[in-house]
Structures are given as structure tokens and as C-alpha cells.
Amino acid sequence: MTVPRVQLRPKREKPFLARHPWVFAGAIETIPEHAVDGSEVEVVSATGQFVARGLLNRRSKIQVRLYSWTPERPLDDDFFREKLKQAISFRHDILGLGGKRQACRLVFSEGDGLSGWTVDRFGEFVVMQFTSLAMAQRRERLADLLQELLQPRGIYVRTERGIGLMEGLELQDGLLRGELPPDDWTIEDAGITYRVNLTEGQKTGFYLDQRDNRVAAARYACGRTVLDAFCYSGGFGLQAALAGANSVEAVDVSQPALQLARENAQLNGLTNLEFVQADVFRHLETLVQQKRRFGMVILDPPKFARTKKAIPEAMRGYRRLQTLALRLLEPGGFLVMCCCSGSISMEMLDELLAQTAVSTKREVQLLQRLGQAPDHPIALACPETAYLKCLIGRIF
């Protein structure tokens, strides 16, 4: 089948031959007028050399998302079935995350070569998100493939804030196949039972990417007084409590999130947690004024920098959080600092923590640099997929 050819500007093909999947408008010389947004296109160099096959969207900053670097490999149902089977096999057969009450990220967009499509499995239910117009247009076909390969009880679509404007995409949350997930649906993760709200919670219902980091942080929590800031449904705090923390103070501004965290504590018979609804920055400032001290402070804030322009303001936010945390930690206490802003690097966080240590006259031993769980694989050709950072340090 002949598809429209998108021609690149001279000497702009190198990153795409290296399999970076995003072609921005600035790299493109011409797009055929008859090419329809959402349709398959062939990307060629300025000299006409084949580069890759992708999906077009003139309304997006990413005007072509690339999927196949084989000229004869069309982006048809067989292509997406093969990629989806590879992704599922890795999670189920290698990571062992295919249980009826287990949760995992089945498809991690660019990390699995399926740019613009995310799929999370919560036992018998599947939740999808789209960050690409073209993939959203194929949602019925993709749901058919999920139904064929997994036979879930239900497939639900969640939308990401702002993506409609960015992609020219009109899409609403809603059931696509089967049954609605029940409000009291539970999953099991690293020894903890969590109630998850798949239709209303953050993202697709749970922060699966922090699985290993929660366990790593809990290693240092035994016998300590723990402050879990931005606790959401309780992940870090519950894991610390299970590991033997003396007490956990879990703070979040969201009352629904705290209610979910309380229910999760009750589900697991954990009674050494206190839940506080408050603006985290103000609450930490109050704790400093009260001269409170903790043996562990966990900082897992939401994304502060959605664009590169937002980096300076985001770094000021992280600096303020780190400063407050270091003032709250007792000598020998542990800091767990997380950042989910892809535009902020691990090196930037290292440098910021070093500066904060100097300004607060504290000494920091850096124990671990961590990232996202392996069901969120990083595509080396697309460094933007390495978005999650977690530092664990000991403070003196």
C-alpha cells in the first residue's frame, strides 16, 4: 500500500535513523496536502532515503510519531498485535506480574515502541491512556487486541489533563469494553493490599512506577518516625509501616486521596499511621517551627516541570522541599527524594541536594539513585522515557 511521504529538511534524519520516535515540525520540509491527520505516513530524508513509518498529526508539536523502521512493515493490526504480545510477555513471563490481583504497566508508550499509548493492568481490569491523536483514533482496534490477548473483565479509558489541546484530541473517560471496575477493587503489591479507584484516581489509578522505590525506602524505616509527604493513597508510608516504622505521618492536600490511604491502612491492619490533610509546603514549615524531628522524610511531589520553560520554577520548589526536609531530619535520618519531571535530570537533583546540604549545614551520604520499575522500560533511543528519579540519602 502506498502511503504519503513526509520529507525531512536537509541533514535532519540522524536522530530518527537512531530510532528516536518524535519528529517535530522544525525537522519537516513538506507534508503532502492529502495526508490526513492520524493516518500512516512514510518519513524520508531530504534526498528521498527511507527513514521510518509513522503516524501523522499536524495539530501536535510532535507531527509524526515513528513506529517501524522497516520499509515493508505497515502499521496494521498485525504490527500492533506483535508489539503488544511482546510487551505482555515481558511483564507476565519475565517479571511475573500477571496475577489476578497484581498490577503492572503493560504498555509504556515509547518504552515499548508504541508512542502515545499507555496500558495498565489491575488484575482483571485494564486501563488505557492516549497521548496521541492517531493512537486514540485506533482505540477500538487496540481494545480488540487487548481483549483477544488478555480477556479482561473490563477495559476503561482515562484521559490526561491538557492532552486534548496538545494533540487536537477529543476524548472522554469511559468504559470501552466489558464491565466497569468496582469502586472497591483491590490489588496486591509488595506485601500490601491497596484499594484502587480506576475511574477517578490519579493517572490510571495507582503509581506503579514507584513499586521498587517504595520497597527500597522501607529498608531504612524500621524503628523510625517517618514523614510521608504527598502520600496520595499511602504507598511509601504503608510500606514503611509494614517494615516496622514506629510511626508514620502521611500528608496530602487531597481529602479523597487521604480517605483512600486510611482505607488501605485498615485493609492491611496497620495502625501506626496518622493522616493529615494539608498543603505540604505549609505543613512542613509548621513542623520546622514546632522543632519536630523525624528519622525519615519521604518527598514524592507531583510533576513540577511539564516543559523546559518550567524548570527554574520547579527547581525552586524542589529546593524549598529539600531545605525543609533537611531541617526536619534528625542526625542519621534518611531522606527519600522523588522527581517525576522528565526534563529534570538525576544530575540536577544531585547538585541541588549538595547545595541544599551546604545552605542547611548538613552532611549527606547518598545511598541509592533509583528510577522507575522495570515494567516502565527506558528506550535508550528516547531518553525522555527515563523520567522518574529517586534519591535515598542519609543526613548528618
Image (cartoon, helix red, strand yellow):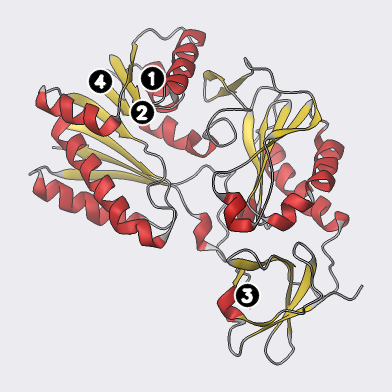
State the CA–CA distance, disc 4 to disc 3.
Answer: 50 Å
State the CA–CA distance, disc 2 to disc 1.
Answer: 7 Å
Position above or below: 88 against 343? above
Report x, y in % for residue 66: 69, 67
> Under tag 1, what secondary structure?
loop
Q: Amino acid at mark 3?
A: Phe
Q: Which residue is mark 3?
A: 16
State the CA–CA distance, disc 4 to disc 2.
Answer: 11 Å
Q: Kindly report which numbered mark, 1 or 3, lies closer to the viewer in this rendering.
A: 3
Which residue is rendered at x = 16% and y = 26% of the image?
Answer: 286
Q: Earlier in the sequence, mark 2 or mark 1?
A: 2
Q: Amino acid at mark 2?
A: Arg
> Under tag 3, what secondary structure?
helix
Callout 3: 10 Å neighbours few (<14), some, many (20+)? some
Q: Which residue is mark 4?
A: 224
Q: Earlier in the sequence, mark 4 or mark 2?
A: 2
**Mark 4 near mark 1, Cβ–Cβ under 8 Å?**
no
Please tell me in which quadrant of the rendered image residue 62 appears.
bottom right
Callout 2: 10 Å neighbours few (<14), some, many (20+)? few
State the CA–CA distance, disc 2 to disc 3.
Answer: 42 Å
Which residue is rendered at x = 10% and y = 43% of the image?
Answer: 360
Q: On the picture, is 223 further left or further right than 378?
A: left
Position above or below: 321 against 258? below
Which residue is rendered at x = 31% and y = 32% of the image?
Answer: 298
Report x, y in % for residue 333: 20, 31
State the CA–CA distance, disc 4 to disc 1.
Answer: 10 Å
